[in-house]
Image (cartoon, rainbow, N blue to C red):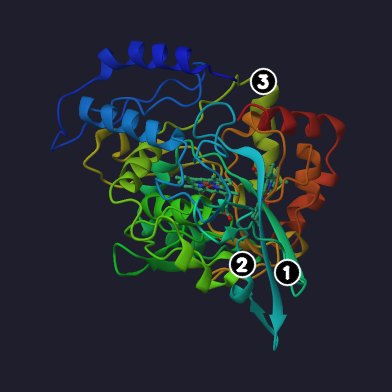
Amino acid sequence: MKAPVVALLAAIAVTLPTFAQRGRPSAPAPNPQPPPQQQQPLGLPLRGLSAADTDKFADGRDEFRKVETVTDGLGPVFNGRSCGECHNAGALGGGSNRLVTRFGTTTNGAFDPLTQFGGSLIQNDAIGPRDGSPHAFRPERVPQQATIVARRRSTPLFGLGLVDATPDSVFVALAARQAAAVAGKVPLVDNISAGMKTAGKFGWKGQNPTLFQFAGDAYLNELGITNPQFPNENCPSGNCAELSFNPAPGLNDTEDTEALADFMEFLAPPPRGNITNDANDGERVFERIGCDSCHVATLQSGSNPVASLNRVTYHPYSDFLLHDMGSLGDGIVQGPASGREMRTAPLWGLRAINTYLHDGRARTLDEAITAHDGQGAASRDRFRQLSGSDRTKLLAFLNSL
Ligand code: HEC
Ligand code: HEC
């Protein structure tokens, strides 16, 4: 699956002339998606993008891999120096086995993110001592007050522009349609640009409503780059007084967040692998034992001025809803998501990753499935009871995604 950058650029150059269009068409045509069996590398832009949007994709991709410096605004505390540092498996924009850490405790019966110690998200690196300053910035550590510690794996970003382009009403209708025992919940979260709460679709807890907002959030909370949506620097280990030594105070970014969002919007979904007879049969098993009640095969984006995002049918194998996963939950309360609730992990592109679940604890698909609990328990039990041959087919299906 590894696509060297040179090969990737060559592939883009070959793909473009066929599909390039000038400007944004006012009445977009349906998006020509490749036939499912056609093998393609990961990390390409959506097919049919205009030349202008293809340029935005390329600019955003440069921004996504750019290594930030202290002068750019990196830190004072941070987790990574570029987005690409954690999002690179298979191609730039992929996931990785890199974990970040959240912590908290329970105070008077309620979840407490321990913000006075820098919670709930740890920034595990810092810019250290600066020339001429008496102060050294230090990485955050889990404080001894924490009773809940959760790790979260870096997720792949392929195809998420289609999810962003899918109206909230689709997810609301999906939740309403699900049987009570597995019914998901649409998390309503603050949408900074819209100035109201809208459906959270992104992150393990559905904590962000748009890719643009996630870009701003990650820019601040993973890299320490303040930006228009997230203008306030993180207080190192919760100590805001240290910010008087911040070598790059003020707004670090004014336009790059937009570029990061463009790259993610236009990043194509992971192409489907070979669909063998076993994989086909395996999908029937997947449906029969109820995996598809949460891992929904097919969604459609809404109307969109970008033809490649306009009413596109896509196959994420997720409903992007929160489910009560019982003991599999990570214990962190985030926005409307309880400690037990997690967003259904999309299964497209599964063959490009090799550790599974929010904390990467599962090394095999079998382990990932048997860890399902709560609303996933009935389906998990049916998986355990499968005959050897049905199990082989189910795994062949998952390995073709
Ligand atoms: C230190 C590693 C790290 C860095 C650096 C990083 N990310 Fe992430 N990213 C993660 C992890 C971990 C998650 C899952 C977080 C969660 O849901 O709690 C994530 C999730 C995401 C998601 C949500 C995807 C989904 O499945 O819904 C987006 C979008 C994203 N990152 C974009 C970015 C952008 C843009 C940057 C650069 C500004 C960036 N990330 C930098 C680790 C990182
Ligand atoms: C009630 C909803 C629900 C059902 C039913 C369900 N899942 Fe899941 N699945 C989830 C959620 C939520 C996650 C993410 C959990 C986490 O990591 O905390 C997940 C994660 C996964 C993962 C790991 C993906 C990754 O990127 O780490 C796999 C594989 C998976 N499910 C397969 C299945 C299969 C196969 C079935 C049927 C036996 C199934 N699931 C049934 C909700 C469900």
Give the residue at the far bottom of this rendering: 108
The total of numbered circles placed on residues is 3
The image shows residue 248 at horizontal and vertical percentages of 40, 55
Checking the image for residue 277, the label placed there is 3
SS label for mark 1: loop
Residue tagged by mark 1? 143
Disc 2 to disc 1, C-alpha distance:
9 Å
State how far apart marks 3 and 1 are (Cα): 52 Å
| 3 or 1: tag closer to the N-terminus | 1
The amino acid beneath tag 2 is: Ser
Which quadrant would the N terminus be assigned to in this image? top right
Tag 2 near tag 1, CB within 8 Å:
yes
Earlier in the chain: of badge 2 and badge 3, it is 2
Q: Nearer the viewer, residue 226 or 243?
A: 243
Which amino acid does the dot numbered 3 rest on? Asn
Q: Nearer the viewer, mark 3 or mark 1?
A: 1
Can residue 320 be seen in the rendering of this structure?
no
Q: To which residue does mark 2 refer?
A: 237
